[in-house]
Amino acid sequence: MYNPLPLLSTGLLEDELRKGKRWFVRQTYARGMTAGISAAFMIRSYPADEESTALQHLKAIEKDRNAFLYDASISAHLERLSIAARQPTGYRVFYAARKGVEWTPPGDYQQKMRNYIRTQHSAWIPQKAGEKIEIGLFEEFGQFFLKFTYDGQDDTIPFDLIEKY
């Protein structure tokens, strides 16, 4: 299973804190699991003024027993985030950075996307010098989506769906 997210690092955490991020939602992250680790988590940050959005995210994943909302203004929470950023033995902690259209998928996923476009949007035939099909990767409350855009038309699908192509 392809994992599009980077590992959380101390530098990345410090950058997010400098940008004013205060709320950090942790959740289980199956795409991050590899042999030899006990658990994989994803952390998504929100600015200080987006507490309600962070709480919506937490509510959306309330069945996840690993779900947790860190408040970086609380020193104990900040310490736990720092530990996570150091990638403790047996765990992998990923950061849900917004990718958008600057994301470049691996070759096999590029082929899956071409197959999807060919079967679901057969009329989308870009010309060499004309408009291109844009594909962006987006995350919302821990779920990934692909957004295909061409000639004023959009199609957004769950990321997991592309794996069937």
Image (cartoon, rainbow, N blue to C red):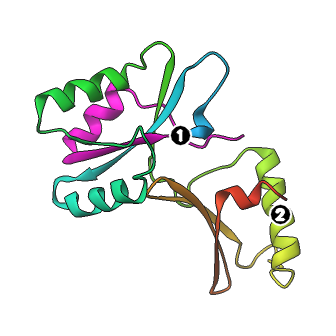
Q: In this rendering, is residue 120 above or below 95?
A: below
Q: Going by the image, does 36 lie left or right of 115?
A: left
Viewer-side residue, 131 vs 1:
1
The three-letter code of the residue at mark 2 reads Arg
Q: Residues within 10 Å of mark 1 (few under 14, many from 20)?
A: some
Residue 127 appears in view: no
Q: Going by the image, does 55 lie left or right of 157?
A: left
Residue sitting at 58 percent across and 34 percent down?
32
x%, y% of residue 150?
A: 68, 79
Residue sitting at 26 percent across and 26 percent down?
80
Q: Which residue is mark 2?
A: 114
| Labels 1 and 2: the sequence-earlier one | 1
| Circle nearer the viewer, 1 or 2 | 1
Magenta span: 1-28
The three-letter code of the residue at mark 1 reads Tyr
Residue at mark 1 to residue at mark 2: CA–CA distance: 26 Å
Q: Which residue is mark 1?
A: 29
Q: Is 22 within the magenta?
A: yes
Q: So how many labels did they put on this image?
A: 2
Q: Which mark, residue 92?
A: none
Quarter holding the C terminus?
bottom right
x%, y% of residue 16?
A: 28, 41
